[in-house]
Image (cartoon, grey):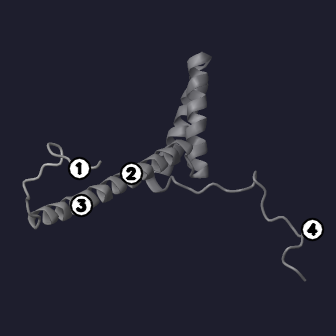
Amino acid sequence: MSDNNPFGPVETTPFQSRTPQNVHGWERIGSLAGGVLMMGKGLRRGGVFGLAQLAIGGMALARGITGHCSAKSMLERNRQHLHEARARIEQAGDELSRMKANATAATDTATVTGNDSLVSPKAGL
């Protein structure tokens, strides 16, 4: 039977795909504890500020339970782009240094004829 069966079982859907965990260890435990604490304070306080504390605590609790933080993954992605840009800049600098060394080596062996093409250009051009 073929592996390309269109009526085969679907393993995952876009809504079931799991995001990679990027919060581990003490950071995750701290998010859980801080989320529970903030939610408890928000419930006791009440009002608009209590509701804000409740929402922030819920976000921290969700971060601790799932082990994934979207803000942290965005920062890590930006940090990776920064490292890639730095590597490209260093590579361009190395290439520029090699070009300078080659130009210096080429001019060391060149002889000067005393003919400046800006002052006395070649005839016929």
> Depth-wise, is mark 2 or mark 1 nearer the camera?
1
Extreme residue toward the top, this view? 47
Residue drawn 43% across the image and 53% down it: 80
Residue assigned mark 2: 85
Residue drawn 79% across the image and 65% down it: 11
Q: What is the number of the mark on residue 123?
A: 1
Q: What is the number of the mark on residue 99?
A: 3
> Depth-wise, is mark 3 or mark 2 nearer the camera?
3
Residue 114, by quadrant, is: bottom left
Q: What is the CA distance from the residue labelled 2 to the residue labelled 1? A: 49 Å
Q: What is the number of the mark on residue 7?
A: 4
Q: What is the CA distance from the residue labelled 3 to the residue labelled 1? A: 33 Å
Considering the numbered disc 4 on the image, is that residue within a helix, a strand or a loop?
A: loop
Q: Earlier in the sequence, mark 3 or mark 1?
A: 3
Q: Are marks 2 and 1 in contact (CB under 8 Å)?
A: no
Please state which of residues 17 and 107 is positioned toward the viewer in this rendering.
107
Specify the amino acid type for callout 4: Phe
> Depth-wise, is mark 4 or mark 3 nearer the camera?
3
Q: Position of residue 84 (x, y in %)?
A: 40, 55
Residue drawn 18% across the image and 44% down it: 118
Please state which of residues 32 and 87 is positioned toward the viewer in this rendering.
87
> Depth-wise, is mark 4 or mark 2 nearer the camera?
2
Q: Earlier in the sequence, mark 4 or mark 1?
A: 4
Q: Earlier in the sequence, mark 4 or mark 2?
A: 4
Q: What is the CA distance from the residue labelled 4 to the residue labelled 2? A: 45 Å
Residue 106, by quadrant, is: bottom left
Specify the amino acid type for callout 1: Ala
Q: Earlier in the sequence, mark 3 or mark 2?
A: 2
Specify the amino acid type for callout 3: Met
Left or right: 93 in relation to 32? left
Q: What is the number of the mark on residue 91?
A: none
Considering the numbered disc 3 on the image, is that residue within a helix, a strand or a loop?
A: helix
